[in-house]
Amino acid sequence: MALEMALEMALETAVSNTGNLATEPAVLVLEDGRAMHGRSFGAVGTTFGEAVFSTGMTGYQETLTDPSYHRQVVVMTAPHVGNTGMNDEDPESERIWVSGYVVRDPSRIVSNWRAQRTLDEDLQAYGVVGIAGIDTRALTRHLRDAGAMRVGIFSGPAASRPVDELLSEVRLSPSMVGADLTSDVTTTQAYSVPAIGDAWATVVAVDLGIKSMTPRRLSERGLNVDVVPSSSSWEDIVARTPDGIFFSNGPGDPATADHAVGLMSKALDAGLPVFGICFGNQIFGRALGLSTYKLRFGHRGINQPVKDLTTGKVEITAQNHGFAVQAPVGEEFDSPFGPARVSHVGLNDNVVEGLELVDGSAFSVQYHPEAAAGPHDAAYLFDRFAEAIARRRDGGA
């Protein structure tokens, strides 16, 4: 009886601390005309973006603060979201980047000891318009069938307007195809992340929308990391005397990233070890002479299976991408920088998930080995990059 009373008191305290979730009406309108009615979550207002779904059951704070989600409305397939709250240790950038947030059942209780605020409070603080109380799995099935598309969320007074009017506004919003978003998310000035322990080499990381955990993973391997804006010139990069170049994740259509492709090509011409992830993989593909294309609904979540074609090992990976590289699987192909090949493929749909030069000097993956959030199956890729740098410093021995 005493235990039951203590649990009841704890529950009442948790509810009083989190407050009441918003109850204003809200409506989600897809560009194909489908509308779903719910209640507001986060900020009240209007927002537009590309509707995408994430299959992760946890890690929502890292998802929200990942710059790769810029101008996207994220639908969570897990029905219950928000029970671990928000804190100041886990963000992957200095702000929430999603354009909108869609959940079925937001938690009314924050029950994690590390929580400092509720999810709803942070969404409101950053002006992120969301919707709750809709069937997110039905929405996900619809997006799987029809493909990712533009969407609008309208809450408060806007939710009472005729759906036809709202649909017209959704269809006028910008598409992700052809979107050049790197300049929106990159750092405005260079900064350094010092090596942990004795520093033995320096890496320049080109920030196309980098997550904070990535330079940390590099620094854990004794690498000083200079993070530079995406607009940096090759001369700016060379002046830092890098031993290797890293190209980060980021949002938008890789077909627009000509400057980043130029930097990648110069790094490969110089024979520097190169490592790219996510958007960086697509940039590497373009530098190799390959094309990119938009996936029907993309890969997002922390449970995506990928096969390493070299070892045959299957990795469970964290992903967030709506574009992919078109490349031949199972055979080498010529590139301006020597023979290259596909190194990894996605096991759900055989999408190219990794590329490499055959000599091992440069490689990339489409997923997120920094594992924030996500499994640590792919952590070896940071070791591989460090080994490539060490080989070059030792004269290729």
Image (cartoon, rainbow, N blue to C red):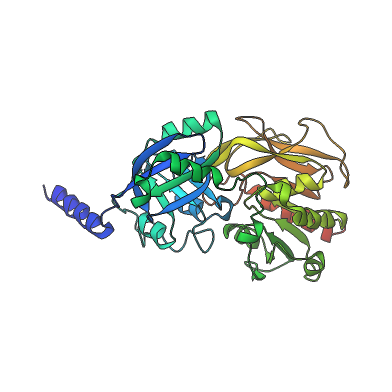
Q: Position of residue 346 (x, y in %)?
A: 64, 34
Using the image as rendered, state which of residue 2 and residue 142 is in the foreground: 142
Question: Please, is residue 21 above or below residue 149 in the view?
Answer: below
Q: Is residue 150 visible?
A: yes
In the image, taking residue 292 as reference, residue 334 lies left or right, namely right
In the image, taking residue 156 as reference, residue 10 lies left or right, namely left
* Image quadrant in which the C terminus is located: bottom right
Total labels: the figure holds: 0
Q: Is residue 84 visible?
A: no
Question: Please, is residue 394 above or below residue 179 in the view?
Answer: below
At 50% across and 50% down in the image, what residue appears?
Answer: 63
In the image, taking residue 67 as reference, residue 231 lies left or right, namely right
Q: Position of residue 305 (x, y in %)?
A: 59, 35
Question: Please, is residue 57 above or below residue 250 in the view?
Answer: above
Task: Return the residue found at the far left.
Answer: 1
Using the image as rendered, state which of residue 204 and residue 397 is in the foreground: 204
In the image, taking residue 293 as reference, residue 89 lies left or right, namely left
At 71% across and 41% down in the image, what residue appears?
Answer: 354
Q: Position of residue 116 (x, y in %)?
A: 36, 62
Question: Please, is residue 229 above or below residue 157 in the view?
Answer: below
- Say which quarter of the image contains residue 300: top right
Q: Position of residue 329 (x, y in %)?
A: 76, 31
